Image (tube, helix red, strand yellow):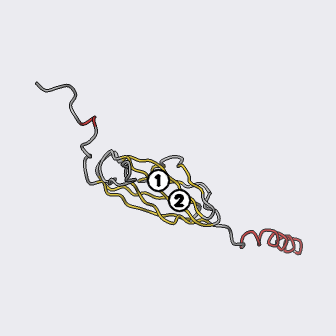
Amino acid sequence: MKKIGSGLAVLCALTGPGLFAASASATVEDIYVTGPSTPGQPYSRACNYVGAQCEIVARLIGADNQDPVVITINGTDLGAPRYARYTNRSAAFIEWRAPALGTYTVIAEQGTSTSTLVINITEPSSGTGSALLPSGSAG
């Protein structure tokens, strides 16, 4: 019985500090969505219609702010985002187009930190795309 007790004490001595030590962390500070830009007016248009070219941005702070981020919409992983890295923070960017009217839940996860944003797509389309216009001439 003495061997088991001393072996357990050694195991706790070796693993205990690692189990209870504070780990470095990162926080998903917030998520926001921007619409397509217009020359001279970046991100001036809304991202509330079907097919709009939107960019989802997750801002990250903390010691591990450069760790990978997973961005999902309604549970579907959007893939690998692009990053902008700074000294004390970073940002993850990923493009997305709403496929249909409805409510979309965006979740950004980095380690144990998560942030959620709900997007409501309320307009069928912008009506400005050439795919919506008939081709040829009338008459």
Residue 129 lies, in percent from the top left, at 28, 39
Hey, which residue is sitting farthest left in the picture?
139
Residue matched to label 1: 72
At label 1, which amino acid type do we have? Answer: Thr
- Rendered image: mark on residue 109: 2
- Of residues 78 and 17, which is closer to you in this image? 78
Residue 37 lies, in percent from the top left, at 38, 49
The residue positioned 72% from the left and 70% from the top of the image is 19
Question: Is mark 2 in CB contact (under 8 Å) with mark 1?
Answer: yes
Q: Is residue 126 above or below residue 31?
A: above
The N terminus, quarter of image: bottom right
Density class for disc 1 (Cα within 10 Å; few <14, some 14-19, many ≥20) is some
Q: Secondary structure at mark 2?
A: strand
The residue positioned 55% from the left and 62% from the top of the image is 60
The residue positioned 43% from the left and 51% from the top of the image is 55
- For this view, does 26 lie left or right of residue 34? right
- Of residues 99 and 16, which is closer to you in this image? 99
- Rendered image: mark on residue 80: none
Q: Which quadrant would residue 90 be assigned to in this image? A: bottom right
- Of residues 47 and 100, which is closer to you in this image? 47
